């Protein structure tokens, strides 16, 4: 992906640190601010900025923002209790996904304005579905919180009689969050601007999982624009052992092509070694150079998420 499009600028954001794009090509970004530009040369004229979204760091940043919002509203023993609950929430189910999505939204709506393309390299399967479905899920949750908050303020105003109710920073924070979620959902569900490129190995479980992932993503209004079939053994191999594996792949290759008959499908051959530099990614560049996963793509402001093996 280092020089797929040589005349544009792009961001590659790795959400899956263990096997993401940035570690694969041997780049270490450190733990700086995700808004900082970190450029590396691909040997082409493209300007590429890789970002690693560290789940632990993003969760800490996300909870610190929550604490800063509510700090003026609580004091004394109550404040210690609230902050202790927030610290415990760091390990609660869904907290990490919410923090990562908040970082993704920041790249999408803020940092991404400076680039032509945003590429999100995400973790396999269910993690990606949960992450990309969060605008819809969290939007409904925030709407419920706003309704309850309005009810509390209405009751408080009735209790005061003609008294004036002061501004509510919690309601304002909820409204800002709701606006960001709506903007992110509008961007991600626009098939002319955003697309998901699924990646699968030609094996039984990845084939079945990829078909199911497509169904779930499309059920949430996301456009699955293409499929890349990875680690395909070449036609000519030098041992019976590899030939057996190639024959084992054949029916799953056909099933993937059938499942994605209405989408562009790219076959990527298994390389003789793992990629360790941009030069090693040249076969990938050649396989994907003409790929356009957008339904009616614009020359600017495109984003796509890739998930796979």
Image (cartoon, helix red, strand yellow):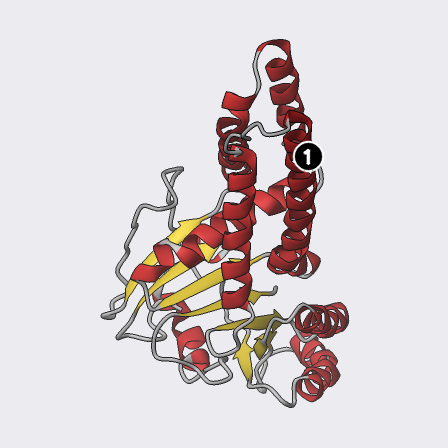
Tell me if residue 101 can be seen. Answer: yes
Tell me if residue 15 can be seen. Answer: no
Residue 86 vertical placement versus 133 (above, below): above
Instruction: Residue at 68% x, 54% y: name it.
Output: 140
Q: Return the residue at label 1.
A: 152
- Give x and y (percent) for residue 231: 58, 72
Outermost front residue: 162
Residue 41 vertical placement versus 222 (above, below): above
Mark 1 element type: helix
Quadrant in the rendering for residue 197: bottom right
In the image, 198 versus 95, the foreground residue is 95
Instruction: Residue at 33% x, 56% y: name it.
Output: 49
Quarter of the rendering occupied by the N terminus: bottom left
- Give x and y (percent) for residue 251: 74, 85
- Give x and y (percent) for residue 303: 45, 68
How crowded is the residue under tag 1: few (<14 C-alpha within 10 Å), some, or many (20+)?
few
Instruction: Residue at 74% x, 79% y: name it.
Output: 248
In the image, 77 versus 19, the foreground residue is 77
- Give x and y (percent) for residue 190: 52, 74
Instruction: Residue at 73% x, 84% y: name it.
Output: 255
């Amino acid at each position: 992906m280092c020089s797929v499009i040589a005349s544009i600028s792009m961001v590659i954001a790795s959400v899956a640190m263990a096997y993401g794009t940035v570690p694969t090509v041997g780049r270490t970004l450190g733990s700086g601010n995700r808004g900082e530009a970190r450029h590396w040369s691909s040997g082409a004229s493209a300007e590429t900025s890789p970002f690693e979204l560290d789940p632990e760091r993003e969760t800490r940043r996300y909870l610190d923002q929550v604490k800063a919002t509510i700090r003026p509203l609580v004091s004394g023993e109550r404040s210690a209790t609230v902050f202790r609950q927030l610290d415990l929430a760091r390990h609660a189910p869904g907290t990490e996904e919410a923090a990562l999505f908040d970082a993704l939204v920041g790249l999408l709506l803020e940092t991404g304005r400076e680039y032509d393309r945003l590429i999100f390299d995400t973790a396999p399967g269910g993690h990606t579905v949960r992450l990309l479905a969060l605008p819809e899920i969290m939007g409904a949750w925030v709407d419920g919180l706003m309704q309850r908050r309005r009810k509390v303020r209405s009751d408080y105003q009735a209790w005061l009689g003609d008294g004036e109710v002061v501004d509510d920073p919690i309601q304002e924070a909820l409204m800002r969050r709701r606006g960001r979620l709506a903007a992110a959902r509008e961007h991600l569900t626009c098939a002319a601007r955003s697309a998901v490129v699924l990646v699968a190995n030609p094996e039984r479980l990845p084939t079945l999982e990829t078909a199911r992932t497509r169904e779930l993503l499309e059920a949430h209004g996301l456009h699955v624009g293409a499929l890349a079939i990875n680690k395909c053994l070449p036609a000519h191999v030098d041992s019976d052992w590899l030939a057996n594996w190639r024959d084992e792949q054949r029916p799953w290759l056909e099933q993937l092509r059938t499942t994605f008959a209405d989408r562009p499908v790219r076959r990527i051959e298994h390389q003789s070694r793992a990629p360790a530099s941009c030069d090693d990614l040249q076969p990938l560049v050649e396989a994907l150079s003409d790929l356009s996963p957008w339904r009616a793509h614009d020359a600017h402001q495109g984003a796509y998420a890739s998930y796979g093996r």
